[in-house]
Structures are given as structure tokens and as C-alpha cells.
Image (cartoon, helix red, strand yellow):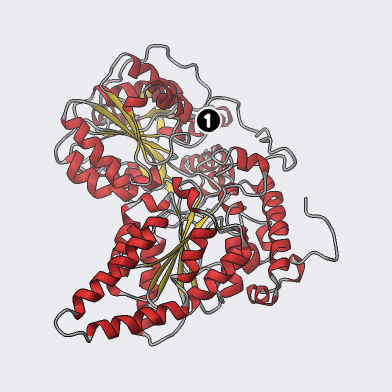
Amino acid sequence: MQPDSEQNILPRITAPQDLQQLTVEELEGLAGELRSQIIQTVSCTGGHLAPSLGVVELTLALLNVFDPARDKIVWDVGHQSYAYKILTRGVEAFKTLRQIGGISGFPRPAESAFDHFGVGHSSTSISAALGLAVARDLAGQDHKVLAVIGDGSMTAGLAYEGLNQAGDLDRDLVVILNDNEMSISRNVGALSSFFSRKLSDQRFIRFKEDLKTWLKQVPRIGEELVTYARRSEESLKSFFTPGMLFEAFKFNYMGPINGHNLQQLTQVLEQVRGLRGPVLVHTLTTKGKGYPPAEKNPTSFHGIGCFEPESGRRLATSGSGQPSYSKVFGDTLVRLAEGDNRIVAITAAMPEGTGLAEFKQRFPDRFFDVGICEQHAVTFAAGLAKQGFRPVVCIYSTFLQRAYDQIVHDVCLQNLPVTFCLDRSGLVGEDGATHHGAFDLSYLRHIPNMTLMAPADEPELQRLLVTALEHAGPAALRYPRGAGPGLDLIEEPIPLDMGQGELVSPGQGILVVALGSCLEPAFEAVRTLEAEQSCRIGLFNPRFVVPLPEAQLRELLPGYDTLLLIEENALAGGFGSAVLEFLSREDLLSGLTIRRLGLPDAFIEHGGIKELHRSAGLDAEGILKALRGLLPSDQG
């Protein structure tokens, strides 16, 4: 989409410092080139399109005023960082976005000296930036530290914890609030711009300090006069602007600013560069700016796969065409909620991603999107459960990590019937290490009172959801991203027996125990080896991690001398560990050869899911290789 022209500015940018030599008009031209490059690349790689399109001018203004080689810019989540990546890493590097061997979709210090803090989960930027600012002061250095945070990330308590301490410490810190949804957009215009400029102008700041010093010298009532003057200023600003909240945190508030007006942004940031103490700059932007399909439907273009750049039409994938696990879950929950008004659905800013869009429409009084507040979501659900409701908390596996303490103390300790539905368990693909659901079995299975399940296919997901909702205590259900094997759904699903797995096929010598998403490739590998070797290999679907199907395993083991345990979770503390602990406790290890397949003790990089499964040895070929290695030497 980017036209070839000698007038293009982007090819002339060899380092972010080059932007400081550009005029406002040149920066405006560069904004269009950046948008074209972002659209062209993301249409091929997928990624977070709309958020990054919305902050192009803000990125240019930041790099025009500040030096990222010296000043520390911390992006929250990283959904907004694509223009920054292009300008600090170069166009060719950006074209490898989210591909194996290419650059991450999120800021990552290991990749770039200009990425000053690694992010992937939201609302961390203010706390991290404050840490960088305090470290700067302790080291006797003198540079700016800036946190760029979106309004969605400002719903999380962590952001306000950071604001609270930053205001109390009175450190030199700049917070840029990128607001693209809040209702205060009416404040954009000359009046709010006037207050942002005039009340934060250097001369005005000096005047305030001089006035404060003079007032304090007034006998007996000096301090009272200073307090009155401060309140008068705050009242004036809060009447015209939404800055009262941030002023309460002792931040100097500036805004709202038109986040697409480069001249205004540059002027304000120039003023900010000369200020000391905590400052919050409030910018108003349009998500998906400059690309009509994304502006019209920013939710769909927040995180998107490959698409046609000209129209925005999503391109067909090579998938099975079957409904995703998320949709199967969502549709089943709707049907169950029709017959049980105790069922309540809760999500943390992910109604579409977790398959709850229809539930939200059908049962608005029983649907709650709490924003990016996973901790609150869990304790909120505990309160509902305490009063007889059946809350279903739907959160991506990686994000539920943030609420571990609430799961332990507020749900499991009280043995409350909260159902956790962990979407995106296992490897998720191009979003990489911060988003893989690699640890949920490890961080949930050791908590007393928790039931932990993993369906191997769509109808099993339906039945385990019913099992969880009929259980008298906490239950967690994990399932992967994308579609399952495509089995027919059940019209009226019934619960499964607690702690009961399924012997898919009997065998001799080798028993494969494959959990959840690993059952399908294990089945393929077993059938291939059986055809090659004219043998019979046992295959068992455990379904439950807690309670483990111990009675069935104990009954099966006499017929086998080799176990292959497979899971799409970190091996440390996962399903295989649970089986080993059981075998050790029951003195059943003697004479058994055991091998485990799972995710390695490392953070797994980004890339296509099929490629990542292949690399981890969790596809059919990898499992087949492991099976061949377990055959007797005269068969291998």
C-alpha cells in the first residue's frame, strides 16, 4: 500500500533521533507512511492493528521531543508499539513481526536497546516506570522516564497503585494516558488546550512557586492561604477538565489533548520535558485511525489475523472450519443458563475473545465485564457464589495468573462453587511468551478443594462444563485456542463421573496417557505406529488432573511396563508430575519405564501454533518419535 516515491520520509529514518530534525509537516507525512506500513505488514502477519494505528502521531511526537537512547519510554501491554518498533528497529525488522525468528509483537529488551521494559500483560507501565525513575535518582542520573498507558489498562488496580506511590514520592515521571473510549471526549477543543498550555507553562509554574513562597511568609495564616490557593486552582481546572482524579494523586494534569494533532502534541511534550515531578498528559485518540475498516470496527481489528489490506476482509485460514472451543463453550453456557438462572458469566475485558458475546446479549443482567481486573473478577465471583449463584469466570489462562491469591484465599479456602474457564490454555501462537497458557495446571492443581479438568474434544468440553457447574466446590476447565477435532456437539450434555477418564483403546507394553488437546495427535501417532509395527498400544484420556483417575490407572498398569505421559503444560508441576506423585505414593514405580512430553522449562517464543507444537514435540510426528524411542530394541 505504500507508494514508491523519492519524497517518502520513512526510508530516510535510520535512527529515532532523526525525527528531531523533521518539521511538523514532515512528521504528518511520515504518519501516513507509518500507517501504510503497519497495515501492510499486519495484513500478512496478524497482530494488534487498531491500537497501534491510534497512536502514530503520539509516537512521532514522543520521539521528536525525547531521545529513546537516553530517556526511558515504557509502553503498557505493547498493543500500541508498532510505530515505535518501526522507528527504532527499522522497516525490514518490522516485516518479521510475530514470525518465528522475527521480532515480538510486544516491547522486549532482549530484542532492542530502545525497549526499556518487557511487557505483555496490561497496567504495568506506571509501576515499572516509577521503578526506573527511582533507580535513576538513586544513581544520580538525569533523564526522563515516561509511561504510555491506554484507558483500558487504567481500569486495573495496579495502575492506581503505581499512581499512588508516584504522587507520594514526587519523582520526575511522565504518564501519557492514551484515551480512545472514555466519555470525556467532549473536552477536546480550544478551552481544554488553553488550560493544558497555560496552567502548565514554565512561567506559570514559576509564578505558582513564587506565590506559594510569598504566601507562606504571611504570619499565622500563611499555610492556610497556600491551601486555599491550591484548592482554587484545582477547582478551576477540574471544572473545565477531567483532571481532578489525577490531581488528587498529586500529578500535574495536562489535557485532554488531541492525540492526532502533531503540533499540539509536540508543544505540550516540549513543556513536559522542562517540568519536574509527576505529570500526566491526557491524549484523546481514535482507535484504528486512518484505516476506515478499523475505525468502523475497532474491536475486530484490535487483534486480527491476516486480512486483505484494501477492504479489511479477513482471509480464510487453513483451519478445519469447525467452531472454536471458545464458541462451543459460549453456546453451551447460553443453553445451560436458559434453564438455570443461578448461572452468571464474568470476564475481564474479553467478552468476544472468551465466547461470551451471545451470553451478554441474552442475559445482560447476569453478565459482568469487570475490565482488566482479574483479581476483582475472582473475588466478585466468590461473593456471588457465597449467596447461592453459580458464577463462571472466563479468563485466558495467562491472565488468570494475576489472580492466584484470590483463587486460593477467596474461592478455594472457602470451598465456593466458582467455575473457572481457562481459554487459550497451552500454546497460543504469535503473541508469544507472555500469552502462552503454559502454567495453569502447575499453579492450580496443588490448591486444596480445586477440581481441574481438560477436555479432549468439543462434546467433552460440554460435558465437563456441566460437571463443573454441578460440582459443590471450585472447578477449573482448561481448553486451547482455536478449533477442536470437529466432533458432533451434544444437544443436552450430561455430567461426567468425577475423576473418571476414558480408555480410548487397549494395548500391551506401552500405555499413552494424553491429556486434553494432546489426545488427538497422540491418537494419530499411536495408529501410525500400530500400522508400522503390527502392535497394540494403549491410549488413555484422563480428563481430570484433580481428582486424578487413580483407580483406573491402578487397574490398567499391570498390563503395561512403559508409560508415555503427554500434556500441553510446563512439565514442572504439571499433569505428568501428578501421575508420578501418585505412582510414588502407591509404590507403583518399580518396573515401569516412564517418559513425559510437555512444554520445556523455558519461555517459549512466538510463532505459528503448528510450528510451536512441532518444536515442542507435541504434534503427531513428535509423539510418534517418542513412541519409537520407547519400543524394545528389536522393534525400534
Percent of width and height locating residue 274: 48, 79
Q: Is residue 477 above or below residue 259?
A: above
Q: Which residue, given by chain and number where applicable, does mark 1 sit on?
A: 483
Q: Quadrant of residue 68?
A: bottom right
Percent of width and height locating residue 139: 37, 85
Q: Is residue 222 above or below residue 263?
A: below
State left or right for residue 461 relative to residue 554: right
Q: Quadrant of residue 304?
A: top right
Q: Quadrant of residue 37?
A: bottom right
Say which of 348 and 222 sits in front: 222
Asked whether residue 74 appears in the rendered view, the answer is no
State left or right for residue 64 relative to residue 438: right
Asked whether residue 482 appears in the rendered view, the answer is yes
Q: Is residue 170 above or below residue 326?
A: below
Q: Residue at x 67, y 42 (%)?
A: 292
Seen as rendered, the residue at the extreme top is 492
Q: Residue at x 35, y 67 (%)?
A: 251
Percent of width and height locating residue 317: 65, 34
| Amino acid type, mark 1 | Ala
Percent of width and height locating residue 581: 24, 44
Circle 1 packing at 10 Å, graded few (<14), some (14-19), many (20+), is some
Q: Is residue 262 above or below residue 614?
A: below
State left or right for residue 87 relative to residue 477: right
State left or right for residue 268 relative to residue 410: right
